[in-house]
Amino acid sequence: MNPARRCSAFVSQLCVSSLGGPTARRPFSPGTVSAPAGTRYCNPGVGGGLTKGTWPQRSPNGASSTRAAPVCPMGGSSSSSRLFGTLAQPLNRAPLAQPDPYLEDNPDQDLAEIDPDQLLRECEEALQRRPARPHRDLVYPTGIAPCRHKHNPPIRILQWNILAQALGEGKDGFIRCPLDALNWQERKYLILEEILTYRPDIVCLQEVDHYYDTFQPIMASLGYHGTFLAKPWSPCLDVEQNNGPDGCALFYRRSRFSLQATSHLRLSAMMLPTNQVAIVQTLNCQVTGRRLCVAVTHLKARSGWERLRSAQGADLLQSLRSIASRAGSSQSEAASASVPLIVCGDFNAEPSEDVYRRFSSSPLGLNSAYKLLSSDGQTEPAYTTWKIRPSGESCSTLDYIWYTHDALSVECLLDIPTEEQIGPDRLPSYHYPSDHLSLLCDITFREEPHRLRLIASHSSPGPIGGLG
C-alpha cells in the first residue's frame, strides 16, 4: 500500500474484518441527473462560504483518491489519535451517561482541531469494501453563477435525518437492506464522509442517538459547536443494547458564527406537550455582522397523525416568531426587524399536508429551498426518502430547508439522486447510510436597503474640486 494512503491501526482492523457484503468499494454509476433546462453545475466540494472541500473519486480496483481543493485550516493531524479512539468504540458497550437535555449545553470537549482531509481519507479507507456513495451535483437553479462578494460569502446548510442506529437495526424493518450494511462500526464512516465531503457551515441532524460518544467529539475536533436535544420518550430506548435516546442535533462552525442565544423547545399540540422537540439558535455571522436564527426539528411520524403534525408546526412557528422578533429587537441597527430564519427538519409530511401549508403561508415569509430545483420553482422534489418495509415501498418528500425569502437568497442546492443511483433495494444500503437523503444548499444574506444606501454613499465620488 502507498505510504501516503496507509490507514491507522483501528481502520486497518476494520478493513480486514469480515463484513459479508461487497468485496470492494466499487465505483457507483451516476446515471443521468435530471435538472431544469438552463441549470448550471458546480463542484460539490466547493462552497460553504469560507471552506472548500474535496470530491472523492473511486477507481475500478476499489481504491480511492481525492481531487484536492484548498481547505480552511483546521490545525494539524497530530491530535487525530484521540479522535479515532472515539470512532473505534464498540457499539455494544454500556451507554454513556446522558446529560439532562433541558439544561444548558455542556461546553465543547477540549479537543485540538484536526485536518478534515485527514479524517475524510480515514473514512474512505474504512469504507473500501463498500460501493461509493451516489454522485450528486451542486446545481445553480437559475443557471447563472452568482456574483461572489468577500463581505457576504455563502453559508452552507446541511439537513439530514441520519437514521438512529437503534431504529435501523431494531425497529424500522428495512427488509431489502442487509443487516450488516447497518453495522454502526462502518455506517458511522458513511455519515461522516457525507459531512466531510461538503464541509457545511451549519449541520442540522435528526435521529441522532450517538451524539455524546461520536458526533459531539468529532464535530468539535472539526471546529464545530454542537447542541443536542433528546426526545422525552425516544423509541430507541425500547431496543436492546441501545445507545440512549435519539434526538435533534445542531452544529455550527465556530470560525464563522458566534452564539447569541439557544432555545430548547418541546413541541405542544392543543396545549399538551408531545414527544417531538426543536432546537433554535440565534447566531451572529462574524463575516457579515448579521444575525441568523437556525432551527432543527423532527415532527411526529406515520400516517394518521396529520392533525398532530399540524399542531406541532403551529406551535413551532409561534415560537420562531417570538424568538426572531426578540433577536431583532436586541440589534441596535434594526430595532424593529425580525432576524431571518432557516428551519431544517424531517417534517414527516408531504407537501399536501396542512403543516406544509402552514409553513409556506406563514407571516414569517418562509420558502422551501428545494422547490428551486424544479423548472417552475414551485414544486418539491419527487422524494427525499425511499425505503422498503414489510408494509410496502414508500417514496416520499418529508424533509425541508425553509428560509426567509425576502432576507436570504439560495445560490445552489445539492441535486437529488436518480432512481438508478439509489438502486432497486432503495435506502438504506451498503452505499448510503440512511433512509433519508441529505439536503444541502448555499444561502447568502440579501442586501438590506439601509446597507445599500451606506455602500452607495461610500462609493459615490465627491463634488468636483472638493466643493459642496
Image: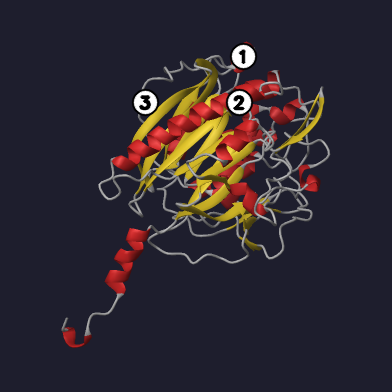
Q: Residue 206 appears in which quarter of the rendering?
A: top right
Residue 295 screen position, x and y as percent: 48, 36
Q: Earlier in the sequence, mark 2 or mark 3?
A: 3
- Amino acid of disc 2: Arg
- Amino acid of disc 3: Asn
State the residue in front, 2 or 192: 192
Q: Is residue 432 left or right of residue 241?
A: right
Q: Residue drawn at (56%, 18%), measured in percent from left and top? A: 243
* Disc nearest the viewer among 2 and 3: 2
Q: On screen, 206 above or below 458?
A: above
Q: Earlier in the sequence, mark 3 or mark 1?
A: 3
* Disc nearest the viewer among 2 and 1: 2
Which residue is under mark 2? Answer: 309
The Cα–Cα distance between marks 2 and 3, rounded to whole angstroms, is 30 Å
Asked if marks 2 and 3 touch (Cβ < 8 Å), the reply is no
Residue 148 screen position, x and y as percent: 47, 64
- Amino acid of disc 1: Gln
**Within 10 angstroms of label 1, few (less than 14), some, or many (20 or more) residues?**
some
Q: How many marks?
A: 3
- Residue 241, label in figure: 1
